[in-house]
């Protein structure tokens, strides 16, 4: 990413010509020549900072200040392929599982390259699909930029448009983290803001951003008239293999970096344990309550639903149950909430003031919350991609974690077929303890009755509200006898069947 020049125009045309393949040929097997021979990295141990060549001592110190003593495999591979930011002969495409360290993988060579050639102008641009993701990446870059004396800006809608415009005009950051809508809005409209000096473009969560081309951000960015070729880094857990989509990026002599074991499109963290529990629709609330209780108060857990409405209902039910049943305070995180409420919910969960985060799929892509012990799919995902991204909230960066999926019997066949697309998926059957289910059943019944009756306060004293919506959470009254089931044993990694 830097000193070796951008390559001549013939190389660029040749590289682009390779990607001009009909999108109908795209599939699970790469059709692009450069994707068929990836630069492979494994999921093994990382590389100690002392063994990383060419890293600025200030950057090393900044990493150690954050408790980072080694680079994960994807980070070490990107550093090597870019010569620590000093080589710009290739664009880089990164396909790596969630939790593998993709953000730091591109952040390190980016800031290193810019620090090596100081010039107060916007030279590095990182584009992400949502303001939450943009804020998170901004947080990763902040200590690195501060250590190297680089200016860093954020244009993601957290401040008003006028405040952002003033920041961009007065501060001229070296690196800008932006969402596509805000970026397109500032190009050509904010005085003093331009991309003519741009040298590096990072497209994070590439597959989502390429679907947002209607916002005009891609054309505005690539049509900057920059004096030299813009080096591009494309990253995603499920990097598209569709040639028509990749052609939009105008990649130059791209290098494809992927896990050595990647034989399928989706891969799961190797330290992840997977379980499924088959349950009738009317018994799902009891199953969830028993599972949360068995996981215990020291297991931060994310519960995923399939819709905003279900997220709100389920959070209301857990609040009505109270911490005595669920063994932890719960908060809601979904696209139905405003950005401030989402931020406060995420902060409460990250700080462990709340143990349970109930959310829609707004959180599945890229959000990094440290120390999540378990993920529960209250509603089974329809697509393998969704399953991978949900599961990827735990077992991050080699840490242990577990994902539990509650399935109706009619969903089992599809679930099994779907997981054939997820590399490394090994799902075990989980039997919830009969006595544990019987223990929570009265509390669940009582909570549902309270919500259906429109009571305003949950047992722990929190405001209940939205009684009408919660009434829909009441399930049918059909009852069946419990079978005798094996016992669940809480473990540091989650739950095991005794």
Image (cartoon, rainbow, N blue to C red):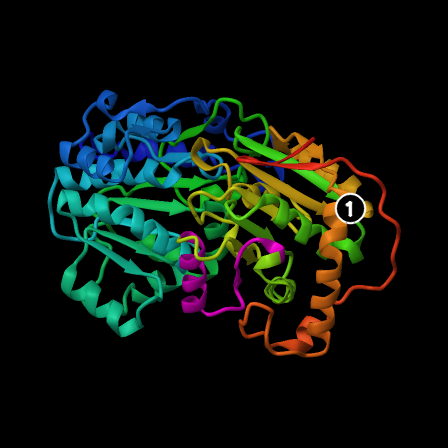
Residue located at (75% from left, 67% from top): 474
**Residue 88, quarter of the rendered image:** top left
- Left or right for 412, reference 114: right
Q: Nearer the viewer, residue 498 or 359?
A: 498
- Residue 106 lies, in percent from the top left, at 32, 38
The residue at the point 59 percent across, 37 percent down is: 26
Residue at 78 percent across and 44 percent down: it is 434
In the rendered image of this protein, does residue 337 appear above or below residue 116?
Answer: below
**Quadrant hosting residue 341:** bottom left
Of residues 298 and 311, which is closer to you in this image?
298
Q: Secondary structure at mark 1?
A: helix
Q: Is residue 473 visible?
A: no
In reply to whether residue 329 is colored magenta, the answer given is yes
Image side of residue 454 versus residue 110, left or right: right
Which range is magenta? 325-350
User: Residue 267: within the magenta?
Assistant: no
- Please identify the quadrant where the C terminus is shown: top right
**Is residue 174 shown above or below 417?**
below
In the image, residue 134 lies at what x, y percent?
A: 36, 55
Q: Is residue 315 visible?
A: yes
How many numbered marks are there? 1
- Report the residue marked by disc 1: 411
The local crowd at label 1, few if under 14, some if 14 to 19, many if 20 or more residues have their Cα within 10 Å, is some
**Which of these two is toward me, 22 or 278?**
278
Residue 371 locus on image (x, y percent): 44, 42
Toward the viewer: 305 or 170?
305
Judge whether 376 appears above or below 357 on screen: above
């Amino acid at each position: 990413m830097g000193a070796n020049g951008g390559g001549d125009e013939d190389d660029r045309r040749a590289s682009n010509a390779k990607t001009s393949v009909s999108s109908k040929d795209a599939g699970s097997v790469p059709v692009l020549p450069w994707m068929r021979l990836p630069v492979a990295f494994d999921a093994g141990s990382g590389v100690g900072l002392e063994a990383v060549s060419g890293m600025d001592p200030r950057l090393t110190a900044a990493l150690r200040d954050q408790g980072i003593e080694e680079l994960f495999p994807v980070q070490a591979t990107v550093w090597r392929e870019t010569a620590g930011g000093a080589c710009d002969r290739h664009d880089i495409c990164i396909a790596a599982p969630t939790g593998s360290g993709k953000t730091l993988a591109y952040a390190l060579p980016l800031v290193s390259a810019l620090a090596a050639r100081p010039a107060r102008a916007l030279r590095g641009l990182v584009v992400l699909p949502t303001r939450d993701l943009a804020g998170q990446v901004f947080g990763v870059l902040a200590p690195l930029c501060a250590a190297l004396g680089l200016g860093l800006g954020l244009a993601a809608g957290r401040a008003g448009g006028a405040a952002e415009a003033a920041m961009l005009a007065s501060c001229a950051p070296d690196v800008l983290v932006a969402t596509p809508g805000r970026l397109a809005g500032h190009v050509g409209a904010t005085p003093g803001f331009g991309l003519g000096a741009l040298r590096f473009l990072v497209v994070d969560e590439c597959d989502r951003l390429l679907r947002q081309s209607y916002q005009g951000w891609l054309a505005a960015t690539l049509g900057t008239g920059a004096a030299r070729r813009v080096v591009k880094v494309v990253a995603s857990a499920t990097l598209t293999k569709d040639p028509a989509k990749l052609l939009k990026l105008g990649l130059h002599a791209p290098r494809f970096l992927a896990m050595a074991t990647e034989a399928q499109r989706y891969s799961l963290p190797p330290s992840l344990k997977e379980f499924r529990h088959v349950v009738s629709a009317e018994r799902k609330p009891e199953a969830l309550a028993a599972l949360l209780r068995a996981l215990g108060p020291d297991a931060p857990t994310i519960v995923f639903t399939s819709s905003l409405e279900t997220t709100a209902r389920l959070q209301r039910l857990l609040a009505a149950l109270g911490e005595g049943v669920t063994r932890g305070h719960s908060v809601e995180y979904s696209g139905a909430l405003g950005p401030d409420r989402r931020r406060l919910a995420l902060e409460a969960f990250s700080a462990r003031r709340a143990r349970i985060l109930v959310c829609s799929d707004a959180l599945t892509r890229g959000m990094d919350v440290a120390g999540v012990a378990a993920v529960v799919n209250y509603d089974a995902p329809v697509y393998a991609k969704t399953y991978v991204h949900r599961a990827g909230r735990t077992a991050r960066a080699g840490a242990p974690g577990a994902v539990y999926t509650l399935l109706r019997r009619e969903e089992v066949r599809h679930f099994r077929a779907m997981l054939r697309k997820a590399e490394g998926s090994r799902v075990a059957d989980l039997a919830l303890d009969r006595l544990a289910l019987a223990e929570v059943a009265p509390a669940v019944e009582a909570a549902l009755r309270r919500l259906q009756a429109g009571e305003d306060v949950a047992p722990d004293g929190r405001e209940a509200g939205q009684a009408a919506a919660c009434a829909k959470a009441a399930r049918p009254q059909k009852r069946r006898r419990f079978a005798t089931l094996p016992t669940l044993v809480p473990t540091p990694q989650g739950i095991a069947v005794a």
